[in-house]
Image: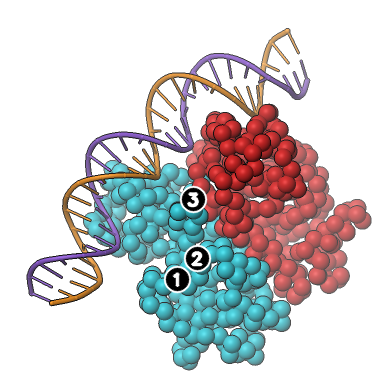
Chain colours: A cyan, B red, C orange, D purple
DNA sequence: CGACTGATTGAAAGTGGTCAACAAAAGTGG
DNA sequence: CCACTTTTGTTGACCACTTTCAATCAGTCG
């Protein structure tokens, strides 16, 4: 593993407060790997063997049932994912695939749990990580249940614009069909939702979004920190 | 606080592995209260002041936005709720109201966080608690995105029947409009979904559900541990 | 009993999904 | 670099599912 990556990991909230021996032990057991795009990393139902730490690239977390698929989240560096399954030593509830060529560190779940039992700082950090993950999921569920398709898209765009620093224009970070799935609708519905938002201050041209009337969009969307997630979402 | 309740709390997974001094300190700061039915315990947006431990009764966790409301979960004894907000020292994302007369222990969030920083066993247990909560929420979101209304109701009924020990007949634990909200539909839609399930082995009479053809229901619902939650749901 | 709440039903409207066709991009191979 | 294929996005027509509104019915509680 490159020294630089090791430092990136060390600086993650999850690992920052570990003792050095505990961290070294974890890293010793870890694999640093580069995966090509579109590779299935995890299939839902498998028992959690590794905690994943994203260093570069992007990973989609998705779920399926019968013939249906849905995107649950897009993970971007530098973060960990599927900590909950590792901690519970339980089957993954979501599948994961790379969206781009990605560099990912795999830490055996056994070692994570061991580090965890031994190192108090790590346990505390894990609680913070999980709590934040939990809260983002609550937001996702609330969003799905309380807003309709057009409102979900509007809120999403509003939040991306804020994340980019309150800019008027930005480029969608992922394919539209992925966004559609994340927002809980079909690509066709997404396309129509974009059209419907033209009356509410949003202009779309390919992947480029321009907010032409922030007040109008805000009025429709009623953005709210209790509903809208700030980071790590497609 | 009654000795008996204290023991119930002590035996919760969350508190079981604490040192006795740490537990005693927590309990010393705690309030044991009885609330009448239909009382608003928590309003979303408030900063988390207390960890709640349910001893008796039932509490609804719900969320609202604009004029719309939705039930996120029903909490039953003996469990804790809104641990994540306490840990993050952040605003509640959900509101809570009692459904019945309920006995609840309130532990100041400050003390929880303190116990937490000091007691390793408590931190470990919190991680397990949060992980399980996280996973149940993933299931809830998957359920909403992957199944339609009729399938969600069918899956719910299938799971209640299993929880009751695989019985054919059981009584709905909560009002139908609450169930409808939890399942992400209107009461009218729930009513129609029940009717639609008559063709799939479910008979409903008031609050009494009878599964007349388990195979048919199972075929429709395709129950799946990666989607269906086993406990603590209305 | 009468007022109230919750559940059900019907009719109408709306939202989003499906299917099919097409357009636009992106990737592939000569 | 260009023709070709494949994938992604858009649009229209239609349909299914769900909601809304209104009316009715069934309990519950004072």
Q: Which residue is mark 1?
A: A40
Callouts 1 and 2 close, C-beta under 8 Å? yes
Q: Are marks 2 and 3 on the same chain?
A: no
The residue tagged 2 is: A95
Label 1 CA crowd tier, 10 Å (few <14, some 14–19, many 20+): some
Secondary structure type for disc 1 = strand
> Of B69 and B184, which appears nearest the observer?
B184
Identify the secondary structure beneath mark 3. Answer: helix
Residue at (58%, 61%) from the top-left corner?
A: A134
How far from the left and from the top, in percent, is residue A120? Answer: 70, 79
Considering only vertical position in the picture, is B137 above or below C15? below
Q: Which mark is residue B112?
A: none
Say if residue B85 shows up in the picture: no
Determine the image quadrant of residue D16.
top left
Packing grade of label 3 (10 A; few <14, some 14-19, many >=20) is many
Q: Residue at x 34, y 47 (%)?
A: A189
Residue A61 versus residue A56: which sits nearer the camera?
A61
Determine whether, in the image, residue A159 is placed left or right of residue A89.
left
Q: At 75% across and 48% down in the image, what residue appears?
A: B165
Are discs 1 and 2 both within one chain?
Answer: yes
**x, y percentage for residue A73?**
47, 62
Distance (Cα) linking label 1 and label 3:
21 Å
Furthest-right residue in this view: B3
- Number of marks in the image? 3
Report the chain holding disc 2.
A
Q: Chain of mark 1?
A: A
Residue at position x 45%, y 54% from top? Answer: A67
Going from the N terminus, do you reach mark 1 or mark 2 first? 1
Q: Are marks 1 and 3 on the same chain?
A: no
* Residue at the disc numbered 3: B145
């Amino acid at each position: 593993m490159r020294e630089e990556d090791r430092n990136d990991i060390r600086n993650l909230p999850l690992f920052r407060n570990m003792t050095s021996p505990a961290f070294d032990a974890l890293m010793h057991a870890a694999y640093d790997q580069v995966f090509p795009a579109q590779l299935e990393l995890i299939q839902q139902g498998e028992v959690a063997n590794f905690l994943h730490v994203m260093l570069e690239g992007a990973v989609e977390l998705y779920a399926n049932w019968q013939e249906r698929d849905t995107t649950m989240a897009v993970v971007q560096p530098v973060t960990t994912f599927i900590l909950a399954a590792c901690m519970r030593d339980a089957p993954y509830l979501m599948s994961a695939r790379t969206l781009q060529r990605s560099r990912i560190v795999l830490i055996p779940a056994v070692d994570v749990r061991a580090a965890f039992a031994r190192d108090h700082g790590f346990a505390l950090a894990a609680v913070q990580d999980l709590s934040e993950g939990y809260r983002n999921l609550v937001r996702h569920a609330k969003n799905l249940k309380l807003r309709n398709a057009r409102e979900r898209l509007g809120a999403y765009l509003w939040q991306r614009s804020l994340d980019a620093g309150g800019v008027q224009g930005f480029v969608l970070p992922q394919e539209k069909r992925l966004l559609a799935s994340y927002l809980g609708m079909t690509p066709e519905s997404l396309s129509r939702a974009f059209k419907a938002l033209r009356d509410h201050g949003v202009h779309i041209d390919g992947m480029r979004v321009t907010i032409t009337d922030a007040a109008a969009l805000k009025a429709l969307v009623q953005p709210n920190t209790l509903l809208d997630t700030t980071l790590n979402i497609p």
